[in-house]
Image (spheres, rainbow, N blue to C red):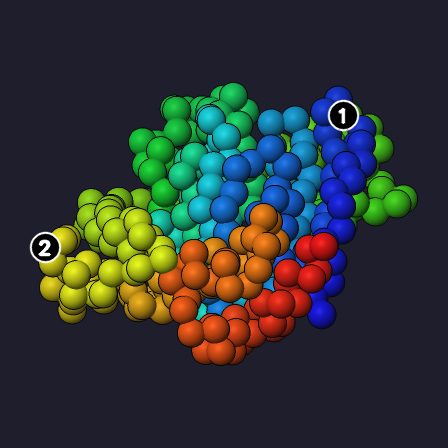
């Protein structure tokens, strides 16, 4: 049985408004909710019981993050107005996909935080910083003599400078250890702010000298087609459209639709839709559903035996167990 989520408990740090906490989760929705102040929505895409861990340290104007998950996940959300994110994989079993772009082991995920779109593989771990514009803009101007480049308003995958990825990982992991230790060596506001600035500079210095954003219009077009297809497929969840019907309504070929799904989400339309529907049933069972049959029918599963087997493969438990655990 997956571990029960631990309740968030913010522990204060040396500066006003600064805090740290961590949580272990046994459900993809609990992982999404374990992000204080952010609006996140997660879908579990690969099979098996979910296990995750989230660690946050909030400093003035800057949040340090580490997140681990056992299963493949599609993350979408909003990190807040005027927030910018920089993220880097710690470990990965395969490529991630950020805003429709493939992410390698030493690639940075950079840009605005208001429309997060990240697909992670199984056994994935990342570190990140989320920085307020009020802190980022002056520091950028101090380092480079100008405001941040226009591409920071996009969401890009960029190769880290040689050796920079290792330096960022080392510094942030040590910072998280020091800040979250019972006998933390960082005990004054001055030391906290010095660490914050050193970390942020290290992340900024890891960015490449030149950034090419010319592929973004093509990426955006593929994402838009995928989003329209998902909206159509989920418009009547209890009676899902066939792929032929979806393609006809979108005015595209099945081959092109499959290509766009593979490029943007790393899977086929049918597999992605099936995962979304199974996640939908799980939320029903953990919410207000009164029976497995009711929840399954609402998401278009009419053969209960086949559904129960698919549900157990996806989440590591029978739907009846999920229903009982809620009560």
Spatial CA span between label 2 and label 1: 56 Å
**Would you call the spot at circle 2 few (<14 residues within 10 Å), some (14-19), or many (20 or more)?**
few
* Observer-nearest of 285 and 313: 285
Q: Tell us which disc is closer to us: 2 or 1.
A: 2
Up-down: is 19 above or below 255? above
Q: Residue at x 21, y 65 (%)?
A: 243
Which residue is pictured at 52% across the width and 37% down the height? 39
Label tally: 2
Residue nearest the observer in this picture, 290 or 193? 290
Q: Position of residue 214 (x, y in %)?
A: 21, 46
Q: Is residue 282 above or below residue 188?
A: below
**Residue lying furthest right:** 183
Q: Residue at x 80, y 32 (%)?
A: 12
SS state under label 1: loop
| Residue 101, image x, y percentages | 33, 55
* Figure quadrant of the N terminus: bottom right
Mark 2 sits on what residue? 251
- The answer to whether one can see residue 117 in this image is yes
């Amino acid at each position: 049985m997956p571990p029960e989520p631990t309740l968030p408990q913010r522990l204060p740090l040396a500066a006003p408004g600064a805090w740290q906490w961590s949580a272990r989760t046994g459900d993809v929705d609990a992982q999404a909710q374990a992000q204080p102040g952010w609006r996140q929505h997660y879908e579990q895409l690969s099979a098996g019981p979910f296990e995750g861990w989230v660690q946050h340290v909030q400093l003035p104007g800057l949040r340090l993050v580490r997140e681990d998950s056992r299963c493949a996940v599609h993350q979408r959300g909003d990190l807040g107005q005027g927030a910018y994110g920089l993220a880097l994989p710690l470990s990965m079993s395969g490529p991630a996909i950020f805003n429709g772009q493939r992410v390698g082991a030493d690639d940075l995920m950079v840009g605005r935080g208001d429309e997060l779109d990240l697909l992670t593989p199984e056994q994935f771990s990342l570190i990140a910083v989320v920085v307020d514009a009020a802190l980022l803009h002056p520091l950028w101007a101090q380092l480079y003599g100008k405001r941040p480049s226009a591409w920071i308003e996009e969401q890009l995958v960029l190769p880290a400078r040689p050796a920079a990825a290792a330096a960022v990982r080392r510094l942030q992991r040590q910072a998280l250890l020091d800040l979250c230790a019972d006998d933390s060596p960082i005990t004054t506001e001055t030391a906290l702010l010095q660490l914050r600035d050193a970390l942020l500079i290290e992340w900024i210095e890891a960015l490449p000298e030149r950034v090419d954003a010319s592929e973004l219009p093509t990426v955006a077009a593929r994402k838009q087609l995928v989003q329209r297809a998902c909206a159509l497929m989920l418009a009547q969840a209890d009676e899902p459209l066939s792929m032929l019907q979806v393609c006809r309504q979108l005015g595209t070929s099945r081959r092109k639709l499959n290509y766009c799904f593979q490029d943007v989400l790393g899977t086929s339309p049918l597999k992605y839709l099936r995962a979304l529907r199974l996640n939908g049933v799980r939320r029903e069972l953990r919410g207000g559903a009164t029976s497995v049959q009711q929840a399954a029918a609402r998401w278009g599963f009419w053969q209960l035996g086949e559904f129960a087997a698919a549900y157990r493969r996806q989440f590591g438990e029978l739907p009846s167990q999920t229903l009982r655990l809620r009560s």
